[in-house]
Amino acid sequence: MKIIESIAKKNRCYTAGRKIVVCGQTLHSVGCPQPKASVFVNTWDSPTASVCPHGVIDGNDGTVYQTLPWNHRGWHGGSGSRGSVNNTHVGIEMCEPACIKYISGSQFTCSDITAAKTAVKRTYKSAVELFAMLNAKYGLNPLADGVIISHKEGCARGLATNHGDPEHLWNGLGMGYTMDTFRAAVCAKMQGVNLTFETDQSYTVTKSCYLRTSAGAAKTNKAAYSAVSEAVKKKCRKKDGYAVFKKGETFRLVSVKSVSGNIWGKLKSGWWIPLIYNGEIRIK
């Protein structure tokens, strides 16, 4: 990740000079087919601009352009019925591929799906690295409730305007990314591990893990264990009513979700395996 300081000193948000206690980060997507971060940097560096996040990630090379000091109150999320993420969160925008075309609201078409996915993977990776750096800088836990949110999640919490980014872009391109996969990747990066937590990818257990019938809700009876598919049973052994994946076993993810500050991955069998548990990564 490369960071270029490009503070928007002409923006009224910057000249207002308001500071915040950084409590987290909000992830945005620009909402238009423009991969060049410099376009937004130049637009925001104006006394007439009404928007000013803390940074924007270039879609062509993943460079981060910092447009406000991290502890400066930005203009990036607006507000909702319960307040504003601008008062607590650093706001980061990700550029979007040039080959998409918006047709209605958050709906778009794409003329080159391969190029689009490549660009989105690039901004996603840089965002993971940036958020890991920011969480380390401010002593924050990326898996704690409300620390890392999207603009869409901010809206659902009553803290931002009604936008669907960046999930709309990931879903529309079939990336397999969610905010839970993003938070998990940030947590892993803070531990020095590069993991994308993509669905339908192979992973290896680094420490024997108990499988559960649902994330965060273990079943300890024989009936629950018998629900494991025959394919999974071949990879597991029975211990105290649980199924266990041993170190070195491999598996593929169907989905990822956060439960009580831990990250769980769903297997094709319907069972769940802890990917990050009590802050410890269990896979590679």
Image: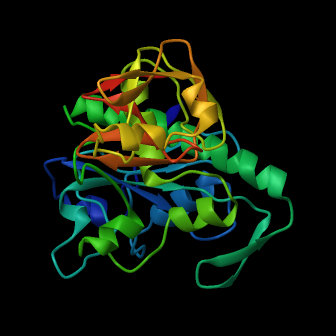
Examine the rendered structure and indicate whether residue 167 appears above or below residue 22.
below
Q: Is residue 182 left or right of residue 212?
A: right
Q: Residue furthest right?
A: 111
> Where does the image place residue 42, in percent across and percent down from the top left?
55, 59
Examine the rendered structure and indicate whether residue 17 appears above or below residue 47.
above
> Where does the image place residue 184, in percent across and percent down from the top left?
41, 38
Residue drawn at x 61%, y 40% as measured from the top left:
62
Residue drawn at x 15%, y 53% as measured from the top left:
20
Q: Looking at the image, how many numbered discs can be counted on the residues? A: 0
Examine the rendered structure and indicate whether residue 9 appears above or below residue 31.
above
Name the colour scheme. rainbow
> Where does the image place residue 9, in percent across and percent down from the top left?
36, 55
Of residue 183 and residue 8, the one placed in the foreground of this image is: 183
Examine the rendered structure and indicate whether residue 185 appears above or below residue 216.
above
Of residue 154 and residue 144, the one placed in the foreground of this image is: 144
Residue drawn at x 28%, y 37% as measured from the top left:
220
Q: Is residue 162 left or right of residue 15?
A: right
| Residue 12 placement: quadrant | bottom left
> Where does the image place residue 67, in percent across and percent down from the top left?
41, 50
Of residue 53 and residue 175, the one placed in the foreground of this image is: 175
Of residue 26 and residue 223, the one placed in the foreground of this image is: 223
Res. 35 in view: yes
Res. 6 in view: no
Q: Residue furthest bottom?
A: 104
| Residue 251 placement: quadrant | top right
